[in-house]
Amino acid sequence: MHKVIELITELLGVESLLAATLSRPQDKRNPVTRVHIRPIELQGQLHYQFAYYEAEKVKHRNLTKAESREELVYLLSKDYRQALLCSPEADYQLLINPGGKAKILKRPPSKKDVNLSHNRSKNYIIPNNQPCPFLARLGVMNQQGQVLPSRMNKFKQINRFLEMVEDVIEFLPQERKIRVLDFGCGKSYLTFALYHYLYERKGLDVEIIGLDLKEDMVRHCNQVAQDLQWTPRLGFWVGDVRDYQRTEQVDMVVSLHACDTATDVALAKAVAWQSQVILSVPCCQHELFDKIENPLMRPLTKHGILKERLASLVTDALRASALEIAGYNVQVLEFIATEHTPKNLLIRAVRSQNRGSSQQLKEEYRNFRDAWSLKDPFIETLFGDLLR
Ligand SMILES: C[S@@+](CC[C@H](N)C(=O)[O-])C[C@H]1O[C@@H](n2cnc3c(N)ncnc32)[C@H](O)[C@@H]1O
């Protein structure tokens, strides 16, 4: 095992670990069947993101270099019998027997051209300094592929969004057309990014529709889609989320910064369609501000700014609970660092295969709702009997 520890220490020490996958749990009852590790940049520092895959869930932890070493050593000595570590020089396959003896097979590198220490931005799903026609058309980068300094936050947001999509792509149908709806798509940077990623990069058959109230925005987006020759797979429609009807299955519902209760409507529609994946970044929740009340929480509710944040959190907690009751595995993640936008929570929900009885979840939901003296929150009027 000491050779494995040496290898991990070396790869992390010189920042040349490009990716790793751990598999074959020692204990067959271990629900985490594999762990993916990849380098990411957080606040200018190299970190590693550990993604722990259970049947239909993925949990993430972002660790520093030192923490990553500790975690990797721990996982390989205790939990997993196989691993693939990729560096620019070589791929290392590790085979560990039940007694803890390890064999290391060195192979030619499968990921050659990423040099973390010199250009970490290459770890973005869409790299900086490489021409990407749709980002040039949207004015995020120039024709040579350089991101414009004033669009750097948007560029990071797009990449972060795609990372969120990357983690759930396996839950989307692979054998037929994937139908995606983006509610409140606005200027649609993320809708275009989604098309680029799913269709151009992953080669999946997709139909993506963006819906928005604003006619001029929709006209503009359709023009861009045409310029890129992305129609008719990608199209934009004028309409209100509330009125949108569709009888066909929608596999993925996206609602990013859709205003106020439009988010709730989007979630309810996704549940009604039994969508496999929901990605939602709520925005400007006003509904509960005047409704939440709990005498014990006076120190929180008597200050406007605290109450506003509290109301947003309570709203999102109700939404996440409602989705769990509806049979989804739900994660609430940081979408993008708060220095870029204060609206930084993303609710990611993946429809579960084993939708058992949700009495306990319903009770949890009701207790929480009642603790804030909430009568008929909007989400409840939409989800109806499901929550009662
Ligand atoms: C803050 S923008 C977000 C745009 C885009 N999703 C993003 O994250 O960059 C919100 C968009 O939602 C649209 N919107 C708000 N309420 C809506 C509704 N009820 N139906 C359709 N679109 C709506 C607005 O017109 C606006 O373009």
Image (tube, rainbow, N blue to C red):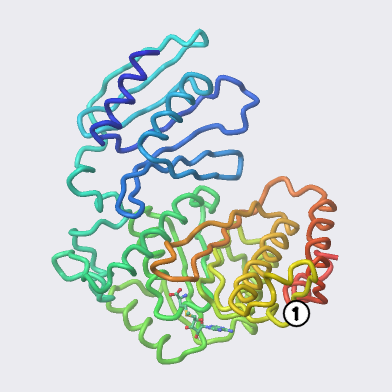
Front residue of 273/80: it is: 80
Extreme residue in the left direction: 144
Question: Would you call the spot at circle 1 few (<14 residues within 10 Å), some (14-19), or many (20 or more)?
Answer: few
Q: Mark 1: which amino acid?
A: Lys
Where is residue 383 shown, x and y percent of the image? 76, 70
Q: Which residue is painted at 39% across and 30% down in the image? A: 69
Question: Which of the 4 image quadrants contains residue 230?
Answer: bottom left
Where is residue 301 shown, x and y percent of the image? 69, 74
Residue 22 vertical placement versus 336 (above, below): above
The answer to whether 326 appears left or right of 334 in the picture is: right
The answer to whether 240 appears left or right of 76 in the picture is: right
Quadrant that contains the C terminus: bottom right
CB at disc 1 and ligand 1 closer than 8 Å: no
Q: How many numbered circles are shown?
A: 1
Residue 201 vertical placement versus 108 (above, below): below
Q: Which residue is painted at 37% across and 54% down in the image? A: 203
Q: Which residue is mark 1?
A: 291
Where is residue 333 shown, x and y percent of the image? 53, 56
Where is residue 77 shown, x and y percent of the image? 48, 19
Extreme residue in the bottom direction: 216
The answer to whether 388 appears left or right of 192 in the picture is: right
Q: Which residue is painted at 48% across and 24% down in the image? A: 74
Is residue 233 in sight in this rendering?
Answer: no
